Amino acid sequence: MNILITGGAGYIGSHAVQRLLREGHTAIVVDDLSRGHREAVNQLDAHADGRLYFYESSVGDGTRMERLMLDHDIDTVMHFAALAYVGESVEQPLRYYHNNVSCGIELLAACDRAAVSRFVFSSSCATYGEPGDEHIPLTEECPQSPVSPYGQTKLDFERILAAWSTSRQIANEPVAVAMLRYFNVAGADRSGTLGEDHAPETHLIPVAIEAALGKRDGMAVFGTDYPTPDGTCIRDYVHVEDLVDAHVRAMDRMQLGTPRAYNIGMGRGFSVREVLAAVKRVTNVSFPVREEPRRAGDPARLFACADRARNELEWNTTVNDLETVVESVWHWMQQHPDGYASVAASTKS
Ligand code: UDP
């Protein structure tokens, strides 16, 4: 199939491109490189079984998206391109709404004009906001009430997709839409080619590994007074390759008609302290950990009930423990101390 992957130079998008190429699909990657890495795509190109095209562009350039869809005879769009920092979204809400909602609308309008009818969307468990304990583990039926502009943009786009789908049904040109609500995506591809390279890095596992590597002067635990067994927040860390597998299954199985949402998580919760213990076990390095106040907007417990994805997509996680997740990140970060800049440097030398 010919698949347009927006944000395909980013962390999750590049892992998706790798998987699609391995399956012999043609990957048409669009990325504005504001957060993505050209080196990630270059590396994939070098080892591709399928065909890979790269275009540096915003998805908000609807005319260009339409042209690409027509020129490449696109069957499916996988829409990863988004800004995804909760804190940044509070500081720069207009930028988030513009990028995550307005640009997405241009992309959908291009789908209409190019008659593309299959769409897989990266949504988020941030659309649930701060669910009460009675909703844990979270099913797709949990009320969606985001507490950050980031979560709101993801929910807004889910609603836009639903309205788009209805309009296309009325026009007798139905679309198939899957919306995958990610929990905490972590890990790196186990062949060692791709990894997470964010600047600044804020996610727990890479931050802890940067501390283990001595790249930062220890790290902080945000909040030790949560109503959880050890007082720290509990999250569901799904391995990025399992997450990508859910996309492939959603792409293959999604039906024309009403969009379907799926929670994608390991289905197990781990506390911040448990994650840090796993990082110390894997790296065999001790590093200073400071206890700091809670970070605004962090719910105490979030983990997925992923039964719907298991039943309808026949999806299952292959990584069900923290160590394997952490090991893959440790391996990537040791091999790429400066992220993708390490790849660029080794190609030059
Ligand atoms: N966290 C932490 N120290 C850090 C980064 C994160 O204690 O340096 C905590 C954070 O408060 C949350 C959990 O780790 O409870 C996961 O945070 P992350 O930013 O990785 O993902 P989020 O759940 O915010 O999407």
Image: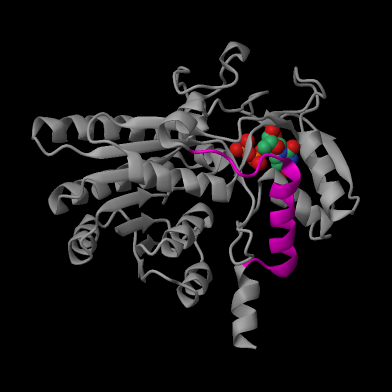
Count of marks placed on residues? 0
The reply, left or right, for residue 198 in relation to residue 95 is: right
- Against 110, residue 163 (above or below) is above
Quarter of the render that holds ligand 1: top right
Q: Report whether residue 95 is seen.
A: no
Q: Nearer the viewer, residue 127 or 149?
A: 127
Q: Image quadrant of residue 162? A: top left
User: Residue 136: percent from the left, percent from the top?
Assistant: 60, 18
* Residue located at (47% from left, 43% from top): 246
* Residue at the far left in the pictured view: 171
Give the position of the N terminus as an image quadrant.
Answer: bottom left
* Residue at the far bottom in the pictured view: 349
Q: Is residue 220 magenta?
A: no
Q: Image quadrant of residue 165? A: top left
The stretch of residues the image draws in magenta is: 315-339
User: Residue 258: percent from the left, percent from the top?
Assistant: 26, 28
Give the position of the C terminus as an image quadrant.
Answer: bottom right
The reply, left or right, for residue 278 in relation to residue 183 is: right
User: Residue 7: percent from the left, percent from the top?
Assistant: 42, 56
* Residue located at (14% from left, 32% from top): 169
* Residue located at (19% from left, 58% from top): 66
User: Residue 208: percent from the left, percent from the top?
Assistant: 77, 49
Figure coloring: one colour
Q: Nearer the viewer, residue 319 or 155?
A: 319
The reply, left or right, for residue 244 in relation to residue 333 is: left
